[in-house]
């Protein structure tokens, strides 16, 4: 959702997201263009496209190591933003890949929220706020390092990715309840109904005087159903 500040200014959201499925598995990406940059929106859009392109080429090459995927992303992003500069297009990037080979990879550059909830509890990749978010200046184009984790893929696992317009307003001690609310109230909806319902929640965000754009993505591994 476009945040109140950008709505008031008549500007589009500087967040972007992407979801894709293919031979590689299932991928979701979230990016937040740095608001002080002239082409923040373009930077975020190209970040999502860069991750998808890198995942496809990495999978075709054998998908041997997550680091081999991560080093592919920024060069692709540079090529996609050309002739614009990295300074003008700097953007955060968070993604989750449920890979076809059975691993769940979650990685991030910059701030926001990236977590995995398993049957055993929460696994943090970026956040929570009490532990300090990733450096707010970390972004594609800044030669920043990725924060990443890999897990065996399991039914019932839930990955949540969010830009800082959502993440900054979540209390760490209530995030598990937030994830459960998302699953209880929205997971069973038809996609079009879920989209509209989540839009309403993000537009009517309860934090007083919130201003930022808000993007929230959930990747849920379906529970096995016994006949």
Image (cartoon, grey):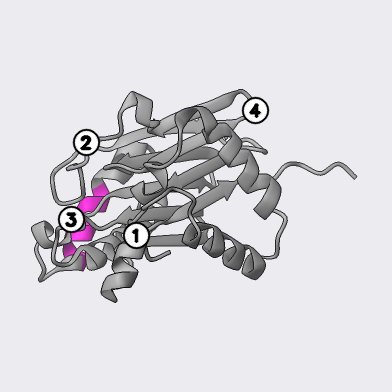
Task: Assign a secondary structure to mark 2.
Answer: loop
Of the two numbered discs 4 and 3 on the same chain, state the one appearing first in sequence.
Answer: 3
Q: Is residue 7 magenta?
A: no
Q: Residues within 10 Å of mark 4 (few under 14, many from 20)?
A: few
- Residue 123 is at least partly visible in this image: yes
Q: Main secondary structure of the magenta part?
A: helix
Q: What residue is pinned by disc 1?
A: 48
48 and 36: which is toward the camera: 36
Image coords of residue 107 (percent x, y): 37, 40
Q: Nearer the viewer, residue 155 or 193?
A: 193
Category of crowding for the residue at label 2, using alpha-carbon neighbours closer than 10 angstroms: few (below 14), some (14–19), many (at least 20): few
Callout in the foreground (3, 1): 3
As drawn, which residue projects farthest toward the bottom?
10
Query: Which residue is label 4 attached to?
Result: 119
Looking at the rendering, the stretch of residues picked out in magenta corresponds to 72-80
> Is the residue under label 1 in contact with that under label 4 (CB below 8 Å)?
no
Q: Nearer the viewer, mark 4 or mark 2?
A: 2
To which residue does mark 3 refer?
90
Distance, label 4 to label 1, CA atoms, is 29 Å
Q: CA distance from mark 2 to mark 3?
A: 14 Å
In what element is the residue under mark 3? loop
Disc 4 and disc 3: Cα gap in Å?
36 Å
> Residue, x 17% and y 61% (percent of image)?
89
Label 4: which secondary element: loop
* Left or right relative to 182: residue 169: left
Sequence-first tag of 2 and 1: 1
Q: Look at the image and tell me in which quarter the C terminus lies.
A: top right
Q: Residue at x 25, y 58 (%)?
A: 33
């Amino acid at each position: 959702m476009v945040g109140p500040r950008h709505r008031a200014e008549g500007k589009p959201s500087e967040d972007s997201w992407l979801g894709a499925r293919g031979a590689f598995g299932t991928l979701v990406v979230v990016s937040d263009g740095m608001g002080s940059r002239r082409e923040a929106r373009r930077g975020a859009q190209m970040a999502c496209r860069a991750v998808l392109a890198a995942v496809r080429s990495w999978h075709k090459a054998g998908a041997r190591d997550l680091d081999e995927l991560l080093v592919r992303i920024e060069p692709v992003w540079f090529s996609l933003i050309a002739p614009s500069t990295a300074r003008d297009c700097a953007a955060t990037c968070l993604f989750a890949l449920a890979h076809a080979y059975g691993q769940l990879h979650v990685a991030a550059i910059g701030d926001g929220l990236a977590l995995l909830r398993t049957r055993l509890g929460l696994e943090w990749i970026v956040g929570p706020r009490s532990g300090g978010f990733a450096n707010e200046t970390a972004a594609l184009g800044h030669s920043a390092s990725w924060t990443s984790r890999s897990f065996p893929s399991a039914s019932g696992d839930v990955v949540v990715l969010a830009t800082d317009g959502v993440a900054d307003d979540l209390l760490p001690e209530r995030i598990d309840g937030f994830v459960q609310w998302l699953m209880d109230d929205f997971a069973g909806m038809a996609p079009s109904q879920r989209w509209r319902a989540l839009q309403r929640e993000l537009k009517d965000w309860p934090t007083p005087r919130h201003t930022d754009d808000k993007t929230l993505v959930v990747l849920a591994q379906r529970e096995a159903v016994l006949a």
